[in-house]
Amino acid sequence: MSGSGAREAVFPTRQSLGLMKTKLKGAQIGHDLLKRKSEALTNHSPEITRRIDEAKRKMGRVMQIAAFSLAEVTYAVGGDIGYQVQESAKQARFRVRTKQENVSGVFLPQFESYTSDSANDFALTGLGKGGQQVQRSRETYARAVETLVELASLQTAFVILDEVIKVVNRRVNAIEHVIIPRTENTIKYINSELDELDREEFYRLKKVSGKKQRDAAEADAEREASKKDAEAEGKGNAAAEAETQDLFGDEENQDVIF
Amino acid sequence: MSASTAAYKDRQFLAVIGDEDTVTGMLLAGVGHVTQPPDSQKNFLVVDAKTQNADIEAAFDRFTQERKDIAILLINQHIAERIRHRVEMYTAAFPSLLEIPSKDHPYDPDKDSVLKRVRRLFGE
């Protein structure tokens, strides 16, 4: 019973039994709480997945529109502006910052896009012709990138949530399948050891009391024997006494009773 | 557990690996950033038919691991397809990796690594 399964290396004392019982209780409470947390998080993730799916679809459309506006630019400018744009990019106007959203104790980062007021890198692009188209294309792409940022924050939230769910589930399983059985085993072990000690103690006491009884009986017998001896001796004594009683020689005299 | 604040506090740029049109569009939106000289690192990479896969991988690694100021990495899906194993291996939360469609390659949700993970998680 006690030897089966892993158990913690403790001395089988009543103190550690108490400790183990507290630990078992704590593990059970922790297990319940973590399980509830995992469920709460798992309930949250279908919504995120749905939104990711939606956003991905939206991204497809938006990117198509953006690509079309770029084609317009190419047509209006009458040449490829790619090289010019790539060379003139210096400082990012479009940046993101991260905020945190708290979902059941998990911090999910959220990207938030903002446009810094730094100088426009592409002021000269499309100066000759097609400036309007360039402007429109820039706006279209800015909107597209905003969609992408939204999608990225959803995706990051999903990745982190996924990780957290995994960690929580791992903990739940560890408590359920390792810590609780091991603590139970330890408690069993301590109990059986304590029972063993009790039995030993009982046996010892029985032995002691048996020995005491035997001793007492022996002592009684001895006393008995010595009494008998004493009685036997006492008869002799009495005879001797009888002889000595005649010291005054007045046995015939009745005692005077007043 | 959840990433610490330090992991994404300084991340404010987007990076792009894409074909010329995608990169141009993104740059027009204003995501382009070149760090201070002398190292002058760009946060975008134009990939065409001549670009080696090794170069794409190097850029991918640079944007995902070396640079700590990138929050989102945008990559065209057909380019992600060329370094698919790298993309599959990438599981970190920051920077966030996003596969986007390009003009010539419409978006295919079945190839998206993240969507694959989503499906796997829900057993769909």
Image (spheres, coloured by chain):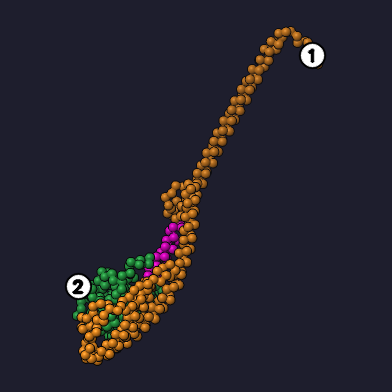
Chain colours: A orange, B green
Above or below — where is A88 with respect to A229?
below
Q: Is residue A36 magenta?
A: no
The amino acid pointed to by label 2 is Pro
Above or below — where is B48 with respect to B61?
below
Q: Is residue A163 magenta?
A: yes
- For label 2, the residue is B37
- Give the image quarter of residue A112: bottom left
Dot 2: element: loop
**Does residue B111 appear to the left or right of A236 in the view shown?**
left
**Does residue B29 appear to the left or right of A252 in the view shown?**
left
User: Taken as a whole, is the magenta stretch helix, strand or loop?
Assistant: helix
- For label 1, the residue is A256
Label drawn at residue B92: none
Q: The numbered mark 2 sits on a residue in which chain?
A: B
Judge by depth and name the residue closer to the eye, A180 or A231: A180
Q: From which residue to which does the magenta span run?
A: A160-181
Q: Position of residue B100 (x, y in %)?
A: 31, 80
Q: Are marks 1 and 2 in contact (CB under 8 Å)?
A: no
Which numbered disc, 1 or 2, marks the residue closer to the eye? 2
Q: Position of residue B101 (x, y in %)?
A: 30, 82
